[in-house]
Image (cartoon, rainbow, N blue to C red):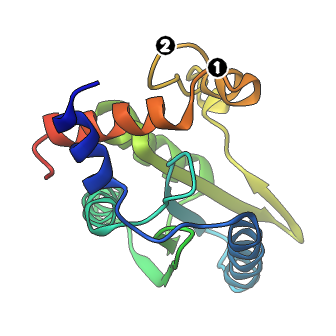
Amino acid sequence: MSESTEALVAMVFDGPEAALPDMLDARERRAACQRELLADARDDESLLCITLSIPGPHKTSPVLEHVFDVLAAQAEAALDGAAVRVRRALGGVSGPELLMLVALPARETKRRVVQVEQTHPLGRLADLDVLGRTGDTLFSVQRTELGLPPRRCLICDGEAKACARSRAHTVYEMQETIAQMIEQGGYI
């Protein structure tokens, strides 16, 4: 590996390290916020939760914050003018997060924003979860419900969840691929 590649990876992931307790706290905080927002949601609203899919302990940095802002703006543009009644930003060492109550049914919200994941040069770094509520029951809309295949691995194009479970690639290999995607896309 070249020194320039190492320097690129170091620049993209130049941020605080998130330990497991940080990630668990962030997950609990996000889930509580999701429940609170969905409890207040109108019948025609869904909840869009935007995060980055970043492996390893470095979940935020100036570069990753910029990438997040670009992808969040793209996701909001994909809503095609649907009203956003509530917007709540979360974050910290676990990475940036944005939750939005959108005036669209959950499946329609997912159908619109999944295009960002599939077509934007950095879309594979976006984690665009859509939740809805039926009575007191919360649900998440999956890509497969829309007839789309599961997310693909950044490195080998296999199924992303299978690669993650088997730890098929090192964190550094994934960070290197992500850094190169960001650089090639002109986002640094």
Q: Secondary structure at mark 1?
A: loop
Compared across the picture, whether 71 is left or right of 159 comes to left
Which residue type carries mark 1? Ala
Q: Nearer the viewer, mark 2 or mark 1?
A: 1
Q: Residue at x 27, y 63 (%)?
A: 73
| Quadrant, the N terminus | top left
Residue closest to the eye, 123 or 184: 184
Q: Is residue 163 above or below residue 119?
A: above
- Residue 58 position, x and y percent, is 49, 59
Q: Residues within 10 Å of mark 2 (few under 14, many from 20)?
A: few
Q: Secondary structure at mark 2?
A: loop
Q: Residues within 10 Å of mark 1 (few under 14, many from 20)?
A: few
- Residue assigned mark 1: 168
- Residue 25 position, x and y percent, is 74, 76
Give the number of callouts. Answer: 2
Compared across the picture, whether 30 is left or right of 153 comes to right
- Residue assigned mark 2: 156
What separation in Å lies between label 2 and label 1 (alpha carbons)?
Answer: 9 Å
Residue at the farthest front position: 3
- Quarter location, residue 64: bottom left
Mark 2 in CB contact with mark 1 (< 8 angstroms): yes
First in sequence: mark 2 vs mark 1:
2
Q: Is residue 97 above or below residue 142?
A: below
